[in-house]
């Protein structure tokens, strides 16, 4: 016997919504072990139900069936659950892995284009720091995600499978995050506060994508990437229909506050993953405000040039 929780319409990861889910679990007489709730929905629903299950009776098992691309390539392999709180992303949460996760790409059939791109942002992220092969696949075949019948295309399955595998390779040995130097935090250094500040206009993956581009520019400033490589990265982001710029990344105070909050999350260190070449990353701990200011300006310039190139093509 299972408790099926379908939450496709839940938009916000709030504590109040998580408490409502625990009320449902209580009303339906969910057993401590043998009637695990099944959550069928996007990352918001999976995070909410996971969090509710982690606090209900101090933790009950649950089964996850992610229905978005982001859910399939990222949430599916994660042990974390959370709700947004105090104006910050994922500020209250727990480590509570699902007892089972089922993946069915057929769900992508009905997903809005913007949410397909949103999921591709996490694929883009893992490719940039861990796999030149996956980056080349995105370059050559990423646009197929926007063609009809894409969910049965073999390149699409390969891209989804490789992305989830690479994510789990990084997460599995450090599931409880005792080590706070995590290359999967690439794209998640400046974006969390910017995403929360613009929560009504930026999706998670969109904020992550712009952070990935901003961070690529930081790499270029340190001569770890050349200009051609940065243009290639912007071009791939464009093919994946990701935003190349957001004004939040030009707001000096906001970007600094974002890094400050990230430092607290990383126990006082920047532990900033940056690309050292396409498909590989290193950590730095000495990013300066001047580098950040320069990167903000360059981000605007690069995105304007790539947009213009596309219009002229
Ligand atoms: N636990 C983790 O480690 C982890 C990792 C990455 C992201 N996340 C979280 O995931 C959340 C984002 O998830 P998301 O991008 O899936 O957003 P989402 O859950 O809001 O889903 C996006 C939209 O698509 C709709 N939808 C879902 N499946 C659909 C389908 N098959 N067809 C049509 N519409 C569908 C939803 O109703 C929603 O409107 C963020 O809150 C982020 O913090 C968590
Ligand atoms: Zn993410």
Image (cartoon, helix red, strand yellow):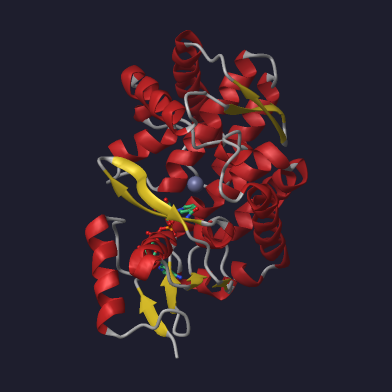
Q: Is residue 149 left or right of residue 9?
A: right
Q: Which residue is drawn at 36% across and 43% down?
A: 89
- Residue 284 location (% of width, % of height): 61, 21
Res. 52 visible in picture: no
Foreground of the two, 275 or 301: 275
- Residue 87 location (% of width, % of height): 26, 40
Foreground of the two, 199 or 237: 199
Q: Residue furthest top?
A: 290
- Residue 51 location (% of width, % of height): 38, 61
Q: Is residue 152 left or right of residue 17?
A: right
Q: Residue at x 40, y 23 (%)?
A: 260
**Ligand 1 visible in quadrant:** bottom left
Q: Is residue 139 left or right of residue 263?
A: right
Residue 221, relative to residue 183: is it above or below? above
Q: Residue at x 71, y 41 (%)?
A: 130
Residue 232 lies in quadrant = top right
- Residue 106 location (% of width, % of height): 56, 75
Quarter holding the N terminus is bottom left
Q: Which residue lies furthest to the right in this view?
A: 133
Residue 253 lies in quadrant = top left
Residue 176, relative to residue 225: is it above or below? below
């Amino acid at each position: 016997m299972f408790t099926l929780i379908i939450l496709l319409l839940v938009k916000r990861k709030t504590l109040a919504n998580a408490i409502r889910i625990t009320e449902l679990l209580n009303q339906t007489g969910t057993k401590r072990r043998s009637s695990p709730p099944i959550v069928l929905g996007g990352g918001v629903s999976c995070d909410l139900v996971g969090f509710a299950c982690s606090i209900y009776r101090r933790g009950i098992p649950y089964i996850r069936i992610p229905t978005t691309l982001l859910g399939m390539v990222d949430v599916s392999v994660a042990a974390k659950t959370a709700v947004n709180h105090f104006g910050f992303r994922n500020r209250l949460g727990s480590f509570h892995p699902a007892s089972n996760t089922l993946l069915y790409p057929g769900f992508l059939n009905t997903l809005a284009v913007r949410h397909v791109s949103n999921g591709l942002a996490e694929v883009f992220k893992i490719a940039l720091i861990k796999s030149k092969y996956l980056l080349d696949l995105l370059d050559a075949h990423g646009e197929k995600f926007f063609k009809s019948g894409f969910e049965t295309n073999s390149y699409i399955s390969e891209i989804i499978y490789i992305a989830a595998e690479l994510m789990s390779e990084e997460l599995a040995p450090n599931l409880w995050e005792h080590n706070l130097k995590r290359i999967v935090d690439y794209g998640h250094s400046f974006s969390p506060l910017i995403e929360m500040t613009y929560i009504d206009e930026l999706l998670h993956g969109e904020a992550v994508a712009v952070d990935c581009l901003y961070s690529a520019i930081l790499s270029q400033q340190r001569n770890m990437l050349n200009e051609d490589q940065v243009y290639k990265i912007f071009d791939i982001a464009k093919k994946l229909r990701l935003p190349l710029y957001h004004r939040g990344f030009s707001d000096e105070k906001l970007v600094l506050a974002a890094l400050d909050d990230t430092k607290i999350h990383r126990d006082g260190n920047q532990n900033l993953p940056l690309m050292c070449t396409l498909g590989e990353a290193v950590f730095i701990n000495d990013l300066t405000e001047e580098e950040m200011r320069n990167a903000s300006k360059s981000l605007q310039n690069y995105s304007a040039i790539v947009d213009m190139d596309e219009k002229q093509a």
